[in-house]
Every structure is written in structure tokens, then in C-alpha cells.
Amino acid sequence: METCYKMVRTSLLHSIPLQSERFGIEVELTMKLAKRGARIFEVPIKYSGRTYQEGKKIGWKDGLHALGCIIKFAASDQVYTADQYGSEILARLNRAPKFTRWMADSIHPYIGSKVLELGAGIGNMTLNLAPRQVYWASDVNPLYLGHLEKLRETRPYLRVCRTDASSVASYPRTSSSTPLSVSTSSNIWRTTSVPCAISTTPYRSMAGGSSWFPTRRACTPL
């Protein structure tokens, strides 16, 4: 953690909000990279360190400060810089796994073996609804898509794509006649054609909450 050099991709580094100004940056950067699922490699180097007579500044107080930073950043969910996609929001849902599980259990009876999830984010719902015969996890946020690609490495049924719900051209194409369940964080539809225009009435409230799901689904192919 307290290393001589750190090399990070510029795009990844810019997407992480950093607060520390002294040696705490070592702890903060390492912990936030780990929380983002970055692959960390240790590479040996050779260097000639300074002695205290030559001006070395680090001491035992810095060790105590590092321990304090570990506690501080272990409890922090600020691992994404605020942007136009709201990247900083979904990371906080990782701290509410029971809520995510409840949402998944609520829509589980309505989905089939093939699913297209719109706005999959970092895969909070994806991991709770999978595995399926085919599962498309989609989003418009490039940071989220990179995270989903890492999930795909060990899940052969999982496919990742950029899908804008308002853009017909961005929907993945499927030639299968098997109904495809189209899921968002608050709604789910079943359709045999994607892209399509979806009508979702009537609705039924689940567990008396504010999340609504259709009990009947209709789809008009475009």
C-alpha cells in the first residue's frame, strides 16, 4: 500500500474523487482502486532511499495516520467522481445488499430465460437475477460498461452492450422467437422483438411499496 510509485490509467484516475493531500493519498488511492475492481499488480523496482540525515521525512506518526486513513476510506463509498451519468450513486447501493435482493426477488417471477437489463450500472441487480440462458447487461455510462465487462469474463451467458432506452438503433438484435424480458431498475416487460415500443398497463404495486411492475405486458414491434 505504501509504495514508491503508482501507475494508473489516466481515465480511471480522473474518475476517482481524491481527498488526501499528504501520505494518506497512498491508502486512499489503493483502497478506492480495489473497491472499483481494478486489477492491481506489484512490480519490483530498485532505488536508493534517503536516510533521515539526508532529509527523509516519514516516521511512526505517518504509520498511525495511515491506519486512520484505512478506517476512514474503508467506510467511504465515494469511489466515483460526480458526472453527467450520476456515476457516484450506484456505488452506494452496494451498501444495501438486502434492498437489492428484495428488488430482485420481487421481479424474479416475471422474467424468463433471456433478459435485457437497461441501466445495469455496476451489476447490482445483474448478479442477483443471473444466471440465465442469455443475459444482456446494458448501460450508457462507459465506466459502468467497463465494470460489467469484468463480470462477463467468468460468466459465459452474460453479454454487455451500450443501450440507450430512447434510441432504437442501440438495442441488441435477436433473431430468437423466445420471449425476451426487458428489465429496468423499476419496471420489467416481456417481448418477442427488440427493439420495440412497449406498453405497460395495467400495473400492480409490489409489497405495498413505490416500485411498480406490470402484470400484463404488450409490445408493438418497430
Image (tube, grey):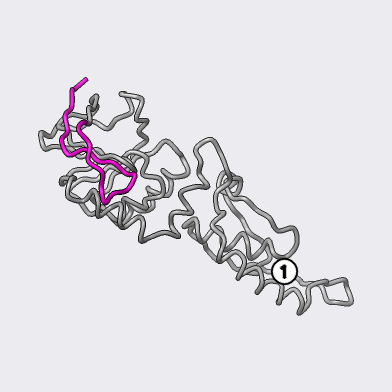
Q: Is residue 49 left or right of residue 81?
A: right
Q: Name which quarter of the figure residue 11 lies in.
A: top right
Query: With 217 as the anchor, is 85 left or right in this view?
Result: right
Task: Provide residue 69's location: percent of width, then percent of height.
Answer: 65, 68
Tell me the quarter of the image containing the N terminus: bottom right
Left or right: 160 with respect to 66?
Answer: left
Taking the image as drawn, is residue 116 in sight?
A: no
Residue 175 can be seen in this image = yes
Which amino acid type is shown beneath numbered disc 1?
Tyr
**Could you tell me which residue is drawn at 13 percent across and 37 percent down?**
179
Q: Which residue is mark 1?
A: 47
Query: In the image as oriented, which residue stretches furthest toward the right?
Result: 53
> Residue 26: which quarter of the image?
bottom right
Residue 89: x percent and y percent? 49, 47
Q: Is residue 102 magenta?
A: no
Q: Which quadrant would the C terminus be assigned to in this image?
A: top left
Q: Nearer the viewer, residue 108 or 148?
A: 108
Residue with the most extreme bottom position: 60
Magenta-drawn segment: 201-222
Q: For this view, does 87 lie left or right of residue 55?
A: left
Q: Is residue 115 above or below residue 97?
A: above
In the image, residue 202 lies in the stretch drawn in magenta: yes
Q: Could you say where residue 28 lies in the image, as x and y percent from the top left?
A: 63, 61
- Front position in the image: 98 or 122: 98
Q: Write the residue at 46% across / 49% down.
A: 90
Disc tally is 1
Q: Above or below — where is 128 with respect to 194?
A: below
Q: Where in the figure is residue 193, as x and y percent of width and height?
A: 17, 29
Identified at 11% across, 37% down, the residue is 178
Badge 1 density bin: few <14, some 14–19, many ≥20, Cα 10 Å: few
